[in-house]
């Protein structure tokens, strides 16, 4: 928060010139890594900016230290920290922390999800034409062109589309009913590891998207399959 809306420091680029990483990303990841090593020295680690460790105890932390870096650098308050713990059964816990709003979303497998301690549930929307749906776009021009083509088919069949720029935050907002659904292709595990569990523990359903091992769709139980059909049809549009 001290760096937010201040002059950017130490900005580099990853996959493309529009895919930045800042010193805020790297420092946040270092802090999280140091805490996990101190508290859970036998656990594995997979983090966006390169921190990693092999698991000795069958548990792995999956970390995105700053999801929504472009928003962060432009001063838009749509970014967060995402941390999940995985074990042999899958996701065990997930936390998405939104510092700009002082909101912390938490989920424990089999024990529900909450926002700042208050239980949350996905929306009860059943009809795609009434659904407010979030999505995101990749950084490579070819991927963006494909996503734009799919969006042209999907948009007329839902209430509207939102594009906040943080997959983890989008999923947290599905979990608490601020969005009815979400889909995105071309993600990485750290983008959705915590948010996926939030949605599922809040009563929602998630689907992997075919052709993208880390692509994901999330929605309430009545909306998930109809929305998945619309997204699949849009993605195969000639």
Image (cartoon, rainbow, N blue to C red):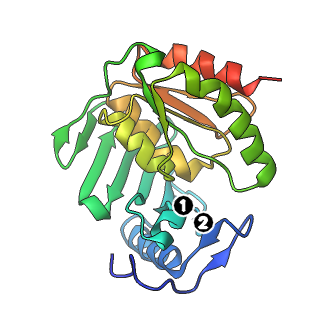
| x and y percentages locating residue 81 in the rendered image | 41, 60
Q: Earlier in the sequence, mark 1 or mark 2?
A: 1
Q: Is residue 145 visible?
A: yes
Query: Could you tell me if residue 43 is visible in this image?
Result: no
Report the disc number at residue 52.
2
Image coords of residue 75 (percent x, y): 42, 70
Q: Is residue 29 above or below residue 180?
A: below
How dense is the environment of label 2, judged by Cα within 10 Å: few (below 14), some, or many (20 and up)?
Answer: some
Q: Quadrant of residue 155?
A: top right
Give the labeled residue for mark 1: 45
Helix, strand or loop at disc 1? strand
In this rendering, would 230 be left or right of 75?
right
Quadrant of image for the C terminus: top right
In front: 160, or 97?
160
* Residue 152 percent across, percent down from the top left: 66, 30
Q: Which residue is rendered at x = 58% and y = 20% of the image?
A: 228
Relative vertical location of residue 72 with respect to residue 114 in this rendering, above or below:
below
| Residue positioned 55% across, 77% down in the render | 22
Q: Residues within 10 Å of mark 1 (few under 14, many from 20)?
A: many
Q: Which corner quadrant holds the N terminus?
A: bottom left
Determine the residue positioned at 38% across, 47% down.
Answer: 94
Left or right relative to 14: residue 219 = left
Of 212 and 127, the residue lying toward us: 127
> x%, y% of residue 116?
19, 50
In the shown orientation, is residue 113 left or right of residue 142? left
Classify residue 99 as left or right of residue 12.
left
Contact check, label 1 and label 2, Cβ < 8 Å: yes
Q: Tell how many labels.
A: 2
Q: Quadrant of residue 32?
A: bottom left
Secondary structure at numbered mark 2: strand
233 is higher (above) or lower (below) than 104: above
Give the CA separation, mark 1 to mark 2. Answer: 5 Å
């Amino acid at each position: 928060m001290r760096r937010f809306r201040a002059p950017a420091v130490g900005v580099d680029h990853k996959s493309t010139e529009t895919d930045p990483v800042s010193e805020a990303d790297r420092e946040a990841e270092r802090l999280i890594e140091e805490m996990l090593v101190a508290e859970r020295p036998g656990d594995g680690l997979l983090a966006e900016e390169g921190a990693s460790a092999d698991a000795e105890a069958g548990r792995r932390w999956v970390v995105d230290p700053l999801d929504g870096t472009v928003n962060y650098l432009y001063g838009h308050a749509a970014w967060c920290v995402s941390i999940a713990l995985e074990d042999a059964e899958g996701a065990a816990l997930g936390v998405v922390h939104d510092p700009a709003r002082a909101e912390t979303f938490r989920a424990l497998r089999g024990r529900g999800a909450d926002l700042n301690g208050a239980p949350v549930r996905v929306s009860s929307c059943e009809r795609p034409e009434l659904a407010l749906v979030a999505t995101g776009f990749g950084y490579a021009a070819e991927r963006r062109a494909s996503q734009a083509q799919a969006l042209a088919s999907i948009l007329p069949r839902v209430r509207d589309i939102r594009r906040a720029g943080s997959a983890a935050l989008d999923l947290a907002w599905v979990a608490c009913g601020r969005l009815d659904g979400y889909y995105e292709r071309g993600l990485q595990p750290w983008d959705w590891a915590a948010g996926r569990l939030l949605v599922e523990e809040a009563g929602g359903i998630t689907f992997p998207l075919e052709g993208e091992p880390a692509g994901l769709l999330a929605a309430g139980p009545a909306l998930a399959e109809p929305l998945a059909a619309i997204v699949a049809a849009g993605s195969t549009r000639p």
